[in-house]
Amino acid sequence: MNIPKHLSYASTHEWLRRDADDVTIGITDYAQSELTDIVFVELPELGRRLAAGDEIGALESIKAVAYIYAPVAGTVAGVNNALRKQPELINQDPYGQGWIVRLAPDDPEKSVELLEAAAYKARIEAGD
Amino acid sequence: MTADTVFEKSHPGRRTTYVTSRGAPPAGLDLLPAGALRDSPPMLPELTEGEVVRHYTNLARKNWAVDVGFYPLGSCTMKYNPRLAEQIAAWPEFSAAHPLRPVRAAQGLLRTMYDTERMLSHLCGLARFTLQPAAGAQGELCGMLMVRRYHWERGERRNTVIVPDSAHGTNPATAALAGFKVVICPSSEEGLVDVAALRGLVDDDLAGIMLTNPNTLGLFERDIQEICRVVHDAGGLAYYDGANFNALVGRFRPGDMGFDVVHLNLHKTFGTPHGGGGPGSGPVGVVEKLEPYLPVPLVTKGPEEFELEEDRPQTIGRLNAFAGSALVVLRAYVYLRLLGTDGLREVSGMAVLAANYLKQRLSEAYAPSHPGRCMHEFVLSAERQSDDFGVRALDVAKRLMDFGFHPPTMYFPLTVPEALMIEPTETENLETLDAFAEAMRRIAEEAEHSPELVRAAPHDTPVGRLDEVAAAKDLNVRWKPGSGGTSGDA
């Protein structure tokens, strides 16, 4: 199970990377392996305002539909349009080409509870 | 790999013999404007009658159905339904009755509807049912619109509906469609509604709760009366999803548990095959205080004859044209009369017994979601097979087809990893249950010793493992000339 150390994690299985102006969000390797083959990605509109914990979009796999939640409040600054044609990028490269959205956060310090890689790993292993 | 389509079997010039006015132009053709006439003949396959009959008969023989074998699809109640209900529903006196026939000339059909309504009300411990909804989901919407109307008429604006995390997906969808905000209530360790958590979720915005009992894990909500009390004390109403009524019919009445609104699936519990492609019927029953809001028309018994009552000022309105799926209601009538009170008690008794027998037999090879007794269905987890041998619930399900069984429901409820949800129903005999248990046990063994065999299953079906990703992403259901067969790349 690949859980990069430099990222932060939400208990709902999103990863988050903080850059200078924005945060990039995707789902974890564990989440994509649980969902199995993803066949459709519903992305938000650019400019949409989200509160922390709001639904950003949805992922449909051959097994289930899962929702993606915003770990921070902010405005949608970018979406990964490549996923519209190639949703499998999330399965193949969840931390790279499979990123989902970029948010311009209202307050970079405020977020839902985020975990370090080790704590996230422990949580998965505990069966959450 | 697959069967050719009827188009690919076509040979120019092959014909079926039938009476024709060969040579003469069809009457009336000259009345059509020139622009509406074809330039070239339609692309129809050319085959003899025998070829066509064999083509479709062979396709039909590849179909799997309750009439062919065991179909333990959890939460679906795929049970055998008595043929008598089909025979009677096919009588032209019923099947040919036009919905615009005057009420006076449809008294027999109306009587079956009236009596069915009374019997369902009695079975559920409620005041009255509407037979209008066309299926369970529409029944849910009907019920929640009445909940909305009830609060509205009392001058209250309540917007929250609580749904447990194990609920059928239609419940939150229904609540949202009826304009409510959905709040999810977590389950306890035991897989039941966490009553303490529920208490923390209710407030004066609560419109109601939507529940099924037994719940989606096949567990009886022991605290159901307390749950209903918490909801009622907060001013909300309790909605019962009758999807799992097969486990209770003739023994427990939702009205006695404290529910205010109930929908039943007649095409599941009461004599119409489920998954038959429709039509369905999802009658909704209510307690007395909700009766004014029932949709119209209602079948009533007038001084001289049965009537269709339309004039009900507080009704939520009409859900469908005419009086609902009358012939599905008729099958329920036959089923109810055929079994009687004692027979219905045996339905739920045998359904629960069969499920517990299978659960017990399978609990060693697979991990049950919860220990102890279940009701009419139970959930196993293939997590051990998945973690240790890389064989997932999907693979187990596919492999079952090689043993001649329809796979159970997979990956539902979402609260159980690698879920396999099994509902044997009351209509399977001991030999079938044993054969199924033995197949499941062997698959667990195969998962351990030859996992590749299970991962590549099915092997003995007309087609092997299908590419579900391609099917979901590039759906192609239309054959076009020159598309080169059935490979799906057209």
Image: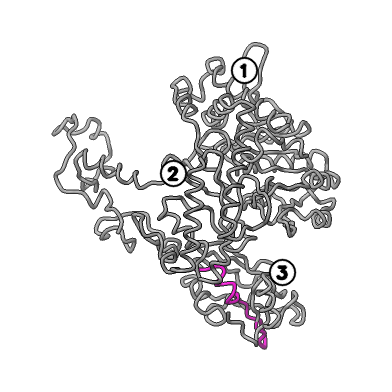
Residue B102 sits in quarter? top right
Secondary structure under tag 2 reads loop
Q: In whole angstroms, how far apart are the C-alphas of marks 1 and 2? A: 42 Å
Chain on which label 3 sits: A
Residue B132 painted magenta: no
Q: Chain of mark 1?
A: B
Q: Which residue is mark 2?
A: B69
Residue B188 located left or right of residue B464: right
Which sits earlier in the primary sequence, circle 1 or circle 2? 2
- What residue is at 76 percent from the left and 51 percent from the top? B159
Mark 3 to mark 2 CA distance (whole Å): 47 Å
Q: Residue at x 65, y 26 (%)?
A: B119
Task: Look at mark 3 in the image and give the residue it sits on.
Answer: A53
Task: Look at the image and say whether residue A30 sits in the magenta stretch.
Answer: yes
Whole-percent x and y of residue A109? 77, 82
* Residue where numbered disc 1 is placed: B306
Residue type at the position of mark 1 = Phe
- Disc 3 on helix, strand or loop? loop
Q: Residues within 10 Å of mark 1 (few under 14, many from 20)?
A: many
Between marks 1 and 2 in the image, the one whose residue lies nearer the viewer: 2
Q: Quadrant location of the N terminus of chain B?
A: bottom left
Instruction: Look at label 2 and name its amino acid.
Output: Gly
Point out the stretch of residues depicted in magenta.
A17-37
